[in-house]
Each structure stands twice: as C-alpha cells, then as structure tokens.
Amino acid sequence: MKKIIEKKTGEKYASKTAMAKHEKKESKAEQMKEMKKASPMKMSVSKKTAYNIKEASNQKLSASARKHYAENAQAAMKNKKSPAQMRVTKKTTYDIKEASNQKLKPSARKHYAENAQAAMKNKKASAVKMKKC
C-alpha cells in the first residue's frame, strides 16, 4: 500500500483513513504546534518597518498618523523582493491593516498590532537562522 504524506506537516501515514483517524485524535493545540513546525521560511523586516507596525496602534497618535504608519508598513513589505526572503503571510498583512481600523476599539487595534509585531519578530529570527546554516 502506498504511504500518504500530509502536505502541510510532512507527516507520513499508512493510508488516508489512518491520517484522518490521527487528525481526529489531535487537539487544536497539537495541530497548531505541528503547523508552526511546518511553517515556511519567513522574511525579516527592517527596524523601520517594525517601528511603523508598532506606531500604527499607538493610541497617543492621531488617527491619520496611525493610518500612515500602517500604510508605510504595508508598502515596505510589498516592496521586499529578495528571493531569499519569503513574502508576508495574509494573516500578518490583515493584522497590520486592522491595527489602523478606526471602527475597532483601541484595545482590539492594539492586539492586531501586537500580533503583527510578533509575526515579524518570528520572521526575523527565522531569517537569521537560515543565514547561519
């Protein structure tokens, strides 16, 4: 019988039913942990871009200033063209966009910005590891 390899995580199973059975037994936390292990190479961002992401949720700034910071961060990430660096995930782009959404509560905007910052930090760390290899 042909072995089945799960595309996202690379796990190997004897059959499709064995894979489905295994996935049913896993908790959400285990599934998320596997996905993090299998996540593709991520890009690093400049300090300026990280600063723009941070300032996009700074409640002390005016709404227009926060919007400009978010736009600058998005533009900088779209302009990254190095083949050694992967593009920003849709989730991170969404987090950056929502960090300046004035229809949301300030606390929600703050959380979106924090999520984007965390994703960028992880990407930067991954890129450094890749360079060392």
Image (tube, rainbow, N blue to C red):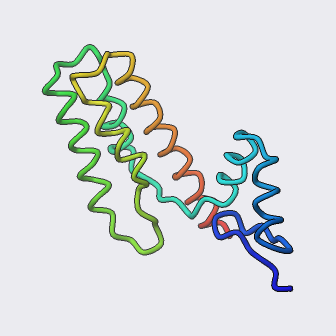
Identify the residue at image location x=28%, y=45%: 73
Horizontal and vertical percent position of residue 120: 47, 46
Horizontal and vertical percent position of residue 126: 59, 56
- Left or right position of 115 against 48: right
Q: Quadrant of residue 11?
A: bottom right
Q: Residue furthest bottom?
A: 1
Vertical order, 70 against 23 (above or below):
above
Identify the residue at image location x=70%, y=56%: 37
**How many numbered circles does the render carry?**
0
Looking at the picture, tell me which residue is in the foreground, 22 or 122. Answer: 22
Vertical order, 46 against 42 (above or below):
above
Identify the residue at image location x=61%, y=59%: 39
- Left or right position of 52 against 117: left
Q: Residue furthest left?
A: 64
Looking at the picture, tell me which residue is in the foreground, 121 or 46. Answer: 121
Looking at the picture, tell me which residue is in the foreground, 86 or 8. Answer: 8
Identify the residue at image location x=36%, y=31%: 54
Q: Quadrant of the C terminus?
A: bottom right
Horizontal and vertical percent position of residue 132: 65, 66
Q: Quadrant of the N terminus?
A: bottom right
- Left or right position of 1 against 66: right
Q: Quadrant of residue 101?
A: top left
Vertical order, 117 against 19 (above or below):
above
Horizontal and vertical percent position of residue 64: 13, 27
